[in-house]
Each structure stands twice: as C-alpha cells, then as structure tokens.
Amino acid sequence: MDQWLLNKLMDVRGCLAHLATKDEAARRRCGPDEDADGIWFGMIPSFQLDVMKVSHSKALRRLGRKTQVVSLPTNAHTRTRGSHVVEVGGTGVLLWPLGLNQDLLYASALAHDMGQVAFGHYGEEFLTKKSGKKFRHEIFGVILAQKIERRGRGLNLTHQDPELRRQPLPRHRRNGPGQRLGRVQRPHVPGQDHLPVRGL
C-alpha cells in the first residue's frame, strides 16, 4: 500500500466513532429466562451474541443453496447467497477502523439476505405480482429472524441488528424490473483516473 493512501486512511480513522452503537445500548425483545441463549447474556457482548445466533441459524445455512443469479448448477465458481453474505461481512469488518461497532456490522452483514427468496430480485417481483403486495426480502428477513426461526420463538436479536437491515441499502436494489443499477459515483483519487466505474 502506498504511503499517500495510508496517510489518507489514517486521517479518517475513528471519524464515525461518535455514531457507533455501544454494546451497552443493546436491547432484546426477551430476557435471559425466555431465550435459549440466555446463559450467555452478560458473559458475551450483545452484538457478538447476535453474530453467534445468526451464524447458527437455519436461514443462514439455506443461503448456501441459493445462487446470486440463475446459472449452471455444475459451475464450481457460482456465487451463492451464502458466499455473498460472507463477502459482505468481510467488507463490513473493513469499516471498523472508522469507529463503528464491528460486531454489529458483522451480524447485520451476515443476516442481510436471510429473507432472500429463490431467484433473488426476480423472485421478489414474482411474489409481489402474485400477492398484490410489495415483497421486500429485507423486511421478510427481519420477520424470519425474529418470528420464524427456532420454531416460532425467533433468534431474539438485539433491536439494533434488524433496524440496520430493515431499510434497503443504497445500490442494493434494482432501479426497476429489468433495469441495471445506475453508475456509482466515487471520490476522485489521483492516479486512478483510468479505472472504470461500474454500477453494482
């Protein structure tokens, strides 16, 4: 890494710390007596416990069988929803030096696609058309985690984790049926003018 970039990164280190959610602010729907993981309350930081709960959820395991796009099932390089959430989790961890809560970022990143249906956004469009109501995987993911997992008892995640996932992330959703996402604006970095900017 060149020294200029390292200096720029050091300039922004901790710049979002004033926005970070502290572990002490974590709140859950149920107390330790009503939660299968209640024995860990107070022993493990709340957002680390969320990471553990999401990591062991059935919904997260099912993401390993869902592809990002429809492709040949024999292709060993097919990106699945499971590999995608791990990649997003790794990217979220990179934001930690800015001062944000790393465990909360990681738990939310792992769980962000829990409500994804077969065929991704096209599956959402199909369910919207069939039900007459707008289907949004980020809302369904919160319902799945808090009401359906663990035979209807839910994972009892902190309120902060689903709150991060309830709103669609910028550039995470399509602009509309069959449309590609728009161009991404990025800050000017000297010496990188030749690099193309693509929509995600």
Image: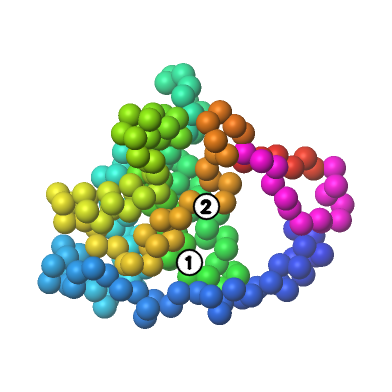
Can the viewer see residue 80? no
Which residue is at 58% across, 46% downward?
A: 171
Number of dots carrying numbers: 2
Magenta part mainly helix, strand or loop?
A: loop
In the image: residue 8, left or right of residue 76: right
Which residue is at 73% across, 73% downward?
A: 11
Q: How is the image coloured?
A: rainbow
As for residue 189 lying within the magenta part, the answer is yes
Kindly indicate whether the residue at mark 2 contacts the one at mark 1 (C-beta within 8 angstroms). no
Q: Which disc, if any, is residue 102?
A: 1
Q: Nearer the viewer, residue 167 or 199?
A: 167
Determine the secondary structure under disc 1. Answer: helix
As for residue 92 lying within the magenta part, the answer is no
Q: Quadrant of residue 159?
A: bottom left
Determine the secondary structure under disc 2. Answer: loop
Q: Residues within 10 Å of mark 1 (few under 14, many from 20)?
A: many
Is residue 91 depicted above or below 45 in this figure?
Answer: above
Q: Quadrant of the C terminus?
A: top right
Question: Which range is magenta?
Answer: 181-194
**Residue 68 position in % (x across, y down):** 47, 33
Which residue is at 24% across, 62% downward?
A: 156
**Residue 49 position in % (x across, y down):** 31, 65
Q: Nearer the viewer, residue 1 or 157?
A: 157
